[in-house]
Amino acid sequence: MYSRKSFRPSSNSTYNFKSAVRDGYTAQQQEQYTKYLKKLKSEFEERWCKKQRFSVEISETETVTTLGTGAFGRVLLLKHKKSHRLYAMKVLEKEKIVKMKQVEHTLNEKRILESIRFPFTVYMEFTFKDNTYVYFIMPFVSGGEMFTHLRRMGKFEEPLAKFYATQVILALEYLHFCSLVYRDLKPENIMIEKTGYLKICDFGFCKVLQGRTWTLCGTPEYLAPELILSKGYGFSVDWWSFGVLLFEMNAGYPPFYANDSMRTYEKIVSGKYRCPSGFSTDLRDLIRNILQVDISHRYGVMRNGVMDFKNHKWFRGIEWDSVLNCRTQSPFIPKFKCPGDTTNFDRYEDEPLVQHTRCRFESEFIDF
Ligand SMILES: Nc1ncnc2c1ncn2[C@@H]1O[C@H](COP(=O)(O)OP(=O)(O)O)[C@@H](O)[C@H]1O
Ligand SMILES: [Mg+2]
């Protein structure tokens, strides 16, 4: 299956809203919601400053199968022997991380996963390290990647794309509120729960942002023009990627695409794309407002922030607070036989983890 590589909550507290307004989101609702976000942010900051302690030992678990592969390792399905609880375990080879100068990124990904808690993002359950690898253990999201379902269905019908877009906007709003820029939004990094709701995974490029940053990272088709042009950039890049995602969910292919990355970048920077004839007027209008090369005209970045999305015509009928609390029925539920069912994932060769007899790169990962 064609795949694009990036180069290089379980929170118990639900959001209690006073009134559900069907069309749009009032300033009053947003004000109330901002108070809730402030609480989530202070919880994020508290976890960020505190060294996490985990009580699960690696010997208490066993690996079941491979769920996915990436640049530095792979993601395995993991079972807790006693409780039979299932997890996804990201296994990263220390040697590869060091050789590719990704130690900082890896420690950062760990700290972010340990600190975030939001209904539409994964988080860290616990971690291990041994002589050869470091391990991130997260909740297992059993429905597979959005990418898999998008390719299977060809494209999503607008109500389904809208349901997913709502959650992605809320997740980005939360991350940005916590000063986190995500930088790798794409269907491969969005998992679908058995309830049909989303969980964004892969915080490998996510970072706390103070001011601007310059690092070139992400996935070619999803890169924002300001990032390609090596201008200092900020949260605007995530809203651009969201525009690309919105297009791809509804069309089945991304708006800027060429056989080589350079040509893709030229198309992105030109800002020219064509919507398929099936797109509704409201959807076209929304995408046009997001895929703006000039960030001062881009939705998400302007004075009204996310309210530009929450009150856009395409989202008419969406009850934002109800989606946040997972009270809206998902238009799509992945097929699912039993708890360990991995039919929603691609098949991979299960290679055994190789262990060195002596601890490698101990000092580099002392803080892990
Ligand atoms: N919590 C999870 N539950 C189920 N599958 C997961 C989970 N996290 C990751 N995966 C699978 O593993 C793949 C690679 O994980 P990811 O964190 O995106 O690594 P990489 O940085 O290598 O892209 C994902 O695209 C997904 O298929
Ligand atoms: Mg990924």
Image (tube, rainbow, N blue to C red):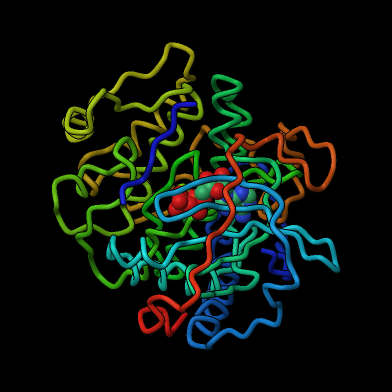
Residue located farthest toward the front when viewing the structure as drawn: 357
Residue located farthest toward the top when viewing the structure as drawn: 277
Residue located farthest toward the bottom when viewing the structure as drawn: 50
For image coordinates 61% across by 59% down, the residue present is 89
For image coordinates 33% across by 53% down, the residue present is 301
Q: Which x, y percent locates residue 365?
A: 41, 79
Residue 317 as seen in the image, left or right of residue 205: right
Residue 302 as seen in the image, left or right of residue 11: left
Q: Which x, y percent locates residue 31?
A: 54, 66
Q: Which x, y percent locates residue 176?
A: 42, 63
Judge by depth and name the residue closer to the eye, 156 or 358: 358
Judge by depth and name the residue closer to the eye, 230 or 271: 230
Judge by depth and name the residue closer to the eye, 236 or 344: 344
Image height of 30 relative to 268, above or below:
below
Image height of 129 relative to 278, above or below:
below
For image coordinates 63% across by 31% down, the residue present is 160
Q: Which x, y percent locates residue 323?
A: 68, 49
Judge by depth and name the residue closer to the eye, 112 or 126: 126
- The part of the image, by quadrant, that contains residue 135 is bottom right
- The part of the image, by quadrant, that contains residue 145 is top right
